[in-house]
Amino acid sequence: MAKEGRYEPPKQSAFGQIFDSLFLLVLVSLSLFVPLWLGLAGGGKTELTFPEKTWQGMGQNDVTAAAFEKLGFTPETAHGIIASRFDYSFDPLTAIITALVITAYFIFVFRFSDKEYRDVIRERFGDK
Amino acid sequence: MTQAQATASHGEKVSLLRVLGPGHVWALGVGIVLVGEYMGWNFAVGKGGAVAALIACWFAGLLYTCVAMIDSEVTSTVAAAGGQYAQAKHIVGPLLAFNVGLFLVMAYTMLEAANAITLGYLVQAVGGMAGFEGGHDKPFIVLTIMFLAWLNYRGVYATLTFNLVITAIAFIAILVLFMAVTAAKVVPLNHAGLIHGETLPYGWMGVLAAMHFGLWYYLGIEGTTQAAEEVRSPARALPLGTMTGIITLLIAATMTWYICVGLMPWEYLGQATTPLFDAARLTSSVPLMVLLFIGTMFATLASANGCINDASRAWFSMGRDHYLPEWFGAVHPKYRTPFRSIIFLVPVALMFALGAPLDQVITFSILSGLLEYTVMSFNMIMFRNKWPLDTIKRGYVHPMHPLPAIVLLVLCGVTYFAVFLGYGTQLMAMMVFYIVASAWFHFHRYQFVRRGAQFTMNWPRPRGY
């Protein structure tokens, strides 16, 4: 192993260690809770409308109606479950921006990792 | 790797203890994941319908088979605590390794929180059925996380032996239910009647969307590698434990789908919190209900237990390398566990379990896993390029390279889109988090890291460097 040019890292203070730990903790919390606080979290949903709240009126057959009843539901209480549907309409521009952000992230991480990795290999194995 | 890496603690060299066999590796992987059969997978039914969920189950199974193949080869060669983190450090570089470490910690800690939420819900619901109305789930959530953290603090052998037993019971519970409804026919299954003509209610877009929660059937199987420094024979035990684990999960996932779709209307199943327990209720058999209640409890406990084990190993490994404050890199002098990392992650898990809804917590866990799998495909190709097969000895060589890596990358791309459908904001929030964390690491934290000391494997110089 090459000993010349070896990088000697500074010793981090206790305060610095606490600060770094808290920084990551705050960052994790923000990424989870900010979408919740802004009301932007969760799947886009829509509701089907039925002519009447009966098993037949909500498109159920004898088998599903019996299963719902065995689970303790009535047509009235099962209505919310049966009517709920996901809404998969989306803005193509938002999809493209999201794809670009993910791609940019990976390019950034792999490029800077490679730069750091070359230093690791040079120090571990010496100059070529 | 022949010796566990030593870690300074209280002025002494203390290492993790090598006591685990292939059974423990299986239990660690399946134990984390089996809960996915007991809850969460069925949200895929909600996103695309029953048939879409089955297609997603198999495609996700294919994704995880690729993960297990890649993981088995790399791990049988880079057997170090931290698993994929240690692999990325040796194969790609420090910044990516830091990111992979965070993926692992986030995925496992949030999965642990999701388990605690489910366990709290189940106890509250069954308490209500038994006449104890008005009970709160929060004390059970706190109790679960604290008890399992204590168990992990006390030692890995007891922890994973405990997991081996309760995982086996939870798996047997699914088998018994399957046999009861198929062979003993305690209740008739009626798949066609319950799907009632809505084979694909959202069309093929629903199949794509279902991939989001399709990952939940298997998420965490890659955790087998986290205990690499505590396994007696890593080159044999890790591939064996991982591959038998993925086979177990594929069987369990298909059986679970078959039972539940044959007993419940898809609209209900897509929103149920404890679908297998509900399936047992529909048999009207009290012994089956008790068995599936116990199975659900044990599956959530085993998963949370494995998650604490894995998240703390990843956090510990980063602390040991100074990617995080070195204080986290200590091993307990008596119990030989990464005790400070275990303790630090307790309030993080509690914060998620007590402060966020279940689907959000699950989605964040899935997203972190997805980022990790994307990295794995690049990692594998770089591993073979930098060290071709004739340069270093592998414990296991996976076949058909680079096909698994390419299939994995394509399926990851599909799953990003599936998450985007309905959960795009969380996806962006997560990406912003990892971008900011990466900038923080590269421009600030990396100054405290020794360069050459990060490469600990006894390998030749990588090609091209």
Image: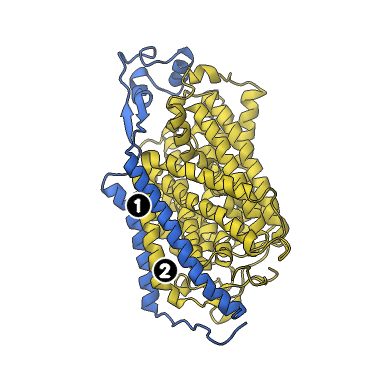
Identify the residue position indicated by label 1 in the image. Answer: B429
- Left or right? Give the position of B240 relative to B58: right
Q: CA distance from mark 2 to mark 1?
A: 18 Å
**Residue drawn at the location 57% of the way across and 44% of the way down:** B63
Q: Give the answer, above or below, for where B202 lies relative to B314.
A: above
- Residue B441's mark? 2
* Residue sitting at x 60%, y 56%: B381
Near-viewer residue (B133 or B174): B174
Residue A106 visible in image: yes
Q: Is residue B394 left or right of residue B343?
A: right
Q: In the structure shown, which secondary structural element does the residue marked by tag 1 occupy? A: helix
Q: Closer to the camera, B429 or A37?
A: B429
Residue at x 46% of width, y 29% of height: B204
Give the colour in which the image draws chain A: blue
Amino acid at circle 2 = Phe
Regarding residue B270, the answer to whether it shows in the image is no
| Label 1: few (<14), some (14–19) or many (≥20) C-alpha neighbours in 10 Å | some
In the rendered image, residue B339, in percent from the top left (x then y), is placed at 51, 67
Q: Quadrant of the N terminus of chain A?
A: bottom right
Q: Which chain is yellow?
A: B
**The C terminus of chain A lies in which quarter of the figure?**
bottom right
Per the rendering, the mark at residue A64 is none
Percent x, y of residue B109: 46, 54
Mark 2 or 1 closer to N-term? 1
Neighbor class of circle 2 (other Cα within 10 Å; few <14, some 14-19, many 20+) is some
Q: Position of residue B246 (x, y in %)?
A: 63, 44
